[in-house]
Amino acid sequence: MNDIVKKINELETRLKKYAYEYYTLDNPSISDYEYDQQYQELKQLLATYPEYLQNDSITRTIGYEILDKFNKVNHVYPMYSLDNAFNIDDLLNFDHRIKKEFSNYAYVLEPKIDGLAISLTYEDGYLVQGVTRGDGQIGEDVTNNIKTIQTIPIVLNKKINLTIRGEVYLKRSNFNLLNEKQHALGLPLFANARNAAAGTLRQLDSSVVAQRKLDAYFYTVANYQELELQSHYESLQFLKELGFCVNEQIVQLDTIDNVLDEIQKIENKRSSNDYDIDGAVLKVNDFKTQELLGFTAKFPKFAIAYKFAAEEVETQLEDIIYTVGRTGQITPNAVLTPVVVAGSTVSRATLHNYDYIQQKDIRVGDFVVIRKAGDIIPEVVRALSNKRKPDSQKVMMIKQCPICYHPLQQINNSVDYYCLNPNCPAKQIEAIIHFASRKAMNIVGLGERIVEQFYNDGLFKSIADIYRLQDKEAMIVEKEGFGQKSFTNLITSINASKEASLDRVLFGLGIRHLGEKGAKILTKHYSTMYDIIQAQYDDLVLIDEIGPKIAQSLVDYFKIAENIELINTLSTLGLKMENKQTANQSNSEFSNKVVVITGTLENYKRDELINILESKGAKL
Ligand code: IVH
């Protein structure tokens, strides 16, 4: 295969994975900005080598396949996506193409709301359907959820048929409140307002949607012909009159120069809005002109989205503190003068490792630029050395663990420093948090705060102590904010976790480099924990997708006597150390049956039910 084909295939696979994470799982692993960069790279390669354009290329699809939980609905008017402009030249080219065909035209410029697209249908003035974009042709029917959005009228003051498009979003203020609630309940936090909005709209329980207070801005009337509307701007005024929210920053403009000025204004205002935007959308105003310009397979030719880079904000680095992860890895963290970035207040940011601090010559007291990597984790991008005080000092790496004072070490020439003391309290707390986390044993109610508290109170020394908590009832129910009910719920969840599959237990141990996927692969290969313990490096590296790093880390982990002791104790306490069908599984009516869980569950949490069914031999 030549290098170009290889590169194209690689980009297609990667981008499809990202699109699936973003559209279907509402859980992106990279930022929109990074996605767009890679998408553009692929687009340019395909423009140069069109012979390698495949039918199922990501560049020919809109959105991604849809999940099964809501009814599927065909869009009468397909929902298109927008072509992107990343710089002024792209915008000038867009304008140039239109200028070639038309002498007289105007634009409408709108903020690009970072939410999820929705299509609403009204019949005789009544809201009859709300549908997500899906793949652009078929979406998901989320009418009941849409009806909980207070600012969307259910009955119009005109008895008309109407199909409109807009963006459902969560205000930054509501997003922060929602995450505060999630935190208080020990539930996972939402990464950003867009994910929270998307996850909420696709909730099966409409009462949950109602509590979270979604909002929507509308920007398209799809059946404008039927309604005899002449221009986009006129249709926006029409929507306003009908009672829909239309963004207040939308403007009508005559020249591309004015457009460029106005884009700057929208970008300047970005951080003070109570909603996230990721760019500005430029649209030709007149509908006749729009029709003449037409569409490509994916985009209208009369509109383009100008994408902003990740929001960067300046603040001051007050201090550097070091945290210890569950593997003992030391991470330097910036303590910042609090500042709002992309919708939430940031006072800590990662500095990754000591090499990063040195390379960027970041110093305490510096003014620094920060942004959210992947729109999620705040990081320090650079120091503004021109604003630096003359007496500032270069940062020196600490020599001892900040918690247990054990000397730090670098392993195998890696840039990272580690505390290798197996009894380091920081490592133990992190290890327990990880073991209890959703993707490992999924113990609800054992979040960061509670684990720290239990550790400090002497209830936890190691992971195994989780399974000894039931004997500590008297001491726990006494604690502030922790009554009998929380205790019972916690113990129920701990007991349910004993049914967790071997791969979850293995992942929960927190072996360096071994993620969820690696743990699954290993437990497909070996049927008991003891087979994995005995596997040699040479056997492990032969397994597809288990590289030398993971193999070495596994061998190192199982060489340590305390780790084997922990596994034995967990086994004695009732955890699953085997993969094979147990008697319980093969006798069960679920044995080897494929089970699909849909709808609202009354007596179980979804994850609990998955654990129980899997333990009975069902395939979910
Ligand atoms: S117009 C045919 N206007 O951006 C044109 N889209 O990247 C359809 N979006 O799917 C879209 N703000 O979810 C339009 N003012 C705006 C928008 C907007 C946000 C979203 C929308 C669309 C996506 C395309």
Image: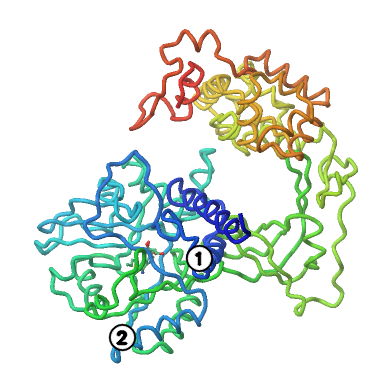
> Of 541 and 288, which appears nearest the observer?
541
- Mark 1 highlights which residue? 46
Q: What's the mark number on residue 83? A: none
Instruction: Kindly identify the residue that appears in the image at 76 percent across and 50 percent down.
Output: 331
Q: With respect to residue 50, does 18 lie above or below?
A: above
Q: With respect to residue 89, does 523 lie above or below?
A: above
Going by the image, does 515 lie left or right of 239?
A: right
The residues tagged by marks 1 and 2 sit, at their Cα atoms, a distance apart of: 32 Å
Instruction: Kindly identify the residue that appears in the image at 60 percent across and 19 percent down.
Output: 579
Q: What's the mark number on residue 106? A: 2
x and y percentages locating residue 131 in the rendered image: 28, 51
x and y percentages locating residue 4 in the rendered image: 59, 61
Q: Secondary structure at mark 1?
A: helix
Going by the image, does 29 lie left or right of 573?
A: left
Going by the image, does 450 lie left or right of 556?
A: left
- Which of label 1 and label 2 is nearer to you? 1
Instruction: Kindly identify the residue that appears in the image at 81 percent across and 49 percent down.
Output: 416
The N terminus sits in image quarter: bottom right
x and y percentages locating residue 298 in the rendered image: 36, 64
Going by the image, does 107 lie left or right of 286?
A: right
- Disc 2 residue type (three-letter): Ala
